[in-house]
Structure formats: structure tokens, C-alpha cells
Image (cartoon, coloured by chain):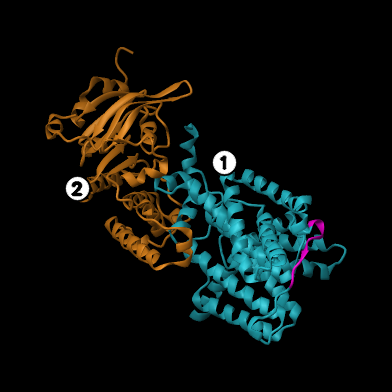
Chain colours: A orange, B cyan
Amino acid sequence: MTQAQLAQGNSPLLAVRDVSVVFGGIIALNGVSFNMHKGNILGLIGPNGAGKTTLFNCLSRLYQPSSGDILMEGASILTRPAHKIAEIGIGRTFQNVALFPNLSVLDNVRVGCHSRTSSDIISDSLKLAWVRRSEADVNKKVHEILAYLDLEEVGHTVVSGLPFGTQKRVELARALAADPKILLLDEPAGGLNHEEVYVLGDLIKKLRDERHLTVLLVEHHMGLVMSIADHVVALNFGRKLAEGTPAQVQADPDVIKAYLGSKDQ
Amino acid sequence: MSAAAEDTVTEAPAVEAVPKRAMTLGTGTSLVILAALLVTPVFVKNFVVFQMTMVMIYGIAVLALNILTGGSGQFSLGQSAFYALGAYTSAVLMENFNVNYALTLPIAGLVSFGAGYLFGKPALRLSGIYLALATFALAVAMPQLLKLHFLEQWTGGVQGLTVMKPDAPFGLPIGQDKWLYYFTLVIALAIYIGSVNLLRSRSGRAFMSIRDNEIAASAMGVDVAQYKTLAFGVSAAITGIAGGLSAIVVAFVAPDSYTINLAIALFLGMVVGGVGWLPGSFVGAAFIIFVPNIAESISKGLSGAVFGVLLFLVIFLVPHGARQVAIVAQQMLGNLRKN
């Protein structure tokens, strides 16, 4: 953590405390700790198998850590089931895009509003007045987000027919629909071409600045992480290797060794 | 905790589904069909009216399966059990407790909802063909449960129960069959509209998000277990109402009317109508009622084989069922208008 952030004296928005994950005999994560501060973009890097996605899945409650804790605004998230994570303000995208392929773009994003709305099957079947009002609010919000991400034209298109890059934006739109405080992005640059990666980088910065989001960026693409992250955590073999500003982490001998190998090997 | 969780993220959905916009017919088409349904009984014989009533009743049951399979992506070969439960609830209430026939239907729906919801709980652990097998067991068990000796004073055991067929109310000058036709039409219409509303709502989107990708649905805040059991409950409730209607219209219930054959027929109706396409449910129901008769008129001795050939032709020529026919018809109409 940089001195400037310490000086602010803010408690972290999200705190990962000594988290370990063991699958059978394999230690996927070993006592990893770091903090995420409001309005920051935190880059989580590491070679294949370093434990990035495992950590990510702990944050979205798909995996249960064997020990340690994860605190969101001071409260542990580990007592919550996976479907109660969106409501406390943690949104995510998936590594290889996990949209609802048979639904339209509009409906995919509408599902994103699920955690912010309520309904029951009787009221829904009868289309009661309060359900109609709630749906009108959802539609307004969804259209605003689609406009923001330049997806309005494909609103009625079924997502399985869209190009990969567009699908990634739809996934982002779906995550935004839940009004997250923290956005977890799992390799958003994967499968994008050179130019698209830089457009994505600008978009992530724009989301942070205009929508006041805190972003956890798990990424292989060093160029992207180093150009937009405020803070970088490097993992290798389940352990935290280094932490600091992009420049610090890039210069860290352990990180260089993990990525390139060392001379004495 | 499972390392497999990651892999299932990109798993293909079990059901190829219909986009939500294309789930219903256009307003114009719907009104024409409704008008035809209102007028037809005036011109046809009572037996045809009875058959049309049965098409609507089976149509409601197929629609219920469509909500479960087309909506939430869960298979069921056990719909006959919920149908039987509804039919017996209505029959027993009418015959043993003198409840008005119309009032027995919501009760049949509630009882079946309870049964479906409870069955949906353990079924959560199963998916795909395993779920189909578990529901199959339900369908096989139900006729025998209905024959149980200690229930015989209410259910009539193997003999079943004969039910009084209700007359038209308020001294309306129409026969029983025609009255029950309109009675069924109103209920079918209400259930159809309610189901369309449901599938287009927040709950319906939750069902479909689960069908398409459970892990992503859960990350969006959808309580997957809750909605899966709800889908079972809703489907069972609607099937139960269809069963109750059949008890009233046929005026008779017996355990062996609700065997696995009925469940398979309903499943067939869904596939022929087009999975996930709600209007197709009624086309599918017409198929399972009329095509066996057609087969019999072609060859009495080989009616089963003829039915098989006809079914094979349908699946081979229009694998997406009535929905596919409707889409082609729509395109042809569109072309005609252009020219």
C-alpha cells in the first residue's frame, strides 16, 4: 500500500485477510492478504495457476476459503451464500463470458437488476401495478446503462449471436445493472485484439471516475494492468509475491523471476 | 466447495430456448384464434366440443411442462402424477365433501403446488436425465398410491370415482358439454395470460437465467435453489388445475388414467408444440389427442406403428415443432404482403 493511501486513513472497502484455499492436497491459495480502497483500480497479476481465479471465486463465494476472512466494508462475506453477494455491492464478470445465451441483451442486463428489485410469482403473473412500476424503473435503468456502454443498437439481439467483444461489454452492462461498489473483472482483455484492449482500459478508468467504482482487475495482459492500475498485487503458487504501485511491482526481482525465470536456475 | 464449479460456467444450456420476444403470438393472430374458439361450438357436434375441451385441458398441462422445461430448463416425466393429484383432489372434494366444482380447482392447484414444491427440493440435486428419471419414478408410483386400500373410502380404489357433471349455471340454455367448453376456455385463457406474464417478468427472467447459466444467475443475485423449486411448484399447480378440469369434464377419475403414458404424452405434446413456445402447447395437445385417432383410422391393427411413423415425420420435418411452422408461416405472409 502506498503512503498516500495510508495517509488517507480510510478503512478499506474490501479486505482480504490471510485467505487460504486447499483443494484436496493442493494449496491453491496460501495466506493471501491485501486491501482494496475506494476508487482504486487494483490489478491482480500472476502466471498461470498462481491462484488468481481461485481468489476471485472466493470473492464471489463460489469457493469457501479453508481459513482467513474476506471483509466488505468491515463485515465478513463468508457467511453469505453466492446469491447474496450482489446485494452488498460486489459485481463480477467471468473469464470466458458467462451470459445467458438465449436471452436478448436487454434481458441479460435486466437480470443484472435482480438483486436490486423484488417480486413474487403471484404478483408477476397478475402483472400488478407495483410490478409494472418496478419493471418500468428496471427498463429505464437498463436503457441508461446500454446507452452508456454503446449497446443500444443490439438491445433486442439474442446475445449468442453477438461478437465476443460485444458480449464482453454486455457482461459489463449486466454487472453494472446491480449498482456494484466493487467490480471484479476476470481477465476482461482475454480474446480481445490490441486496439480493443486499449479501448477497454479507457472504459475501466471511465467507470472508476464517472460511476465511482472500485475495480479488481485480474489480468494476464501486463500492458493493460500496468497502464491503468493504481495498485498491483502479484501472486505466484498461491502466495503473495509482491504488492505496490505498478512501477514497484514491475521492478520487483521476485516478480521478474516468476515471469521470466532466473539466471541461476 | 468444488473445483468443478469453474468448469460449469461455460456449460451449454440443456434446452435450446426460444427468445422471449417470440414466446407468444401477435395480438391480431391471438384475437382471431380466440374468436374462432368462441364461435366454433355453435356449429359442431357435442362430441367435437368435448374433444376441443380436452385439447384445452391437455394444452394447459403441456403449458405447465413448458414453463418448467422451456422456462427453467428442468425436465419432468412425472407430470402425470401432478395431473392425477389435481384430478383426485377435485373429484374427492366434489363427491365426498360436496364442494362446488369451480371451487375445487384452486384447491387442486394449491395441493399440487405443495406436492411439486416439495418434490422440487430433493430434485435440486439432480439435473438433466437424472432429474427426468426421478420424475419418471414419481409417475410410476402415483397410480399405485391412488389404489391404496386405506384411501379407498375417498378414492374408490381401483374402481375410481364417478363425478356429477355440472350443468350450466343461471339457467343458461346450453348443454353440459358446451358449458364446460366455455368454462375451460376461460380458465385456459387466464392461465395462458398469467403464464406469459410470469415468463416475461422478473421471476421468469430468473427462471431463464438459471436455464442458461446457473453460476452467472447466482452471481446476479438469483437464488437458484428457490427459483428451481418454485418452477416445479408453479408447473405442478397448473398441471393440477388441468387435472381437476379433466375430472370435471370427463366426470370420472381412475388410477389407471394417470399412468406414465400420460406423462410421456404431455412430454410429446411439448416437443411437438415447440419447447418454450407457449402457444405451441395447445398445438401439441391437439397432436396427442387427434393423431392417435388418425393413426387408428389408417390401420386398426397397426395404429401404434402408424402413430410412430407420423411422429417420426413431424420430428424429422419440423424438429422445432409448431413454433417452426409458425415462423415459416409468418415469413411467407410477410413475403406475400411485400409482393
Quarter of the picture containing the N terminus of chain A is: top left
Residue B64: percent from left, percent from top: 59, 60
Check disc 1: other Cα within 10 Å, few if <14, some if 14-19, many if 20+: few
Is residue B274 visible in this depiction of the protein?
no
Q: Chain of mark 1?
A: B
Query: What amino acid type is highlighted by mark number 2?
Result: Asp
- The residue that mark 2 highlights is A209
Is residue B53 visible in this depiction of the protein?
yes
Q: Which residues are magenta?
A: B157-164
Q: Residue furthest top?
A: A264
Q: Quadrant of residue A22?
A: top left
Check disc 2: other Cα within 10 Å, few if <14, some if 14-19, many if 20+: few
Q: Is residue A180 magenta?
A: no
Quarter of the picture containing the C terminus of chain A is: top left
Q: Nearer the viewer, residue B205 or B145?
A: B145
Q: Residue furthest front?
A: B97
- The residue that mark 1 highlights is B125
When the figure is inspected, residue B304 is found, relative to residue B102, above or below; the finding is: above
CB atoms of marks 1 and 2 within 8 Å: no
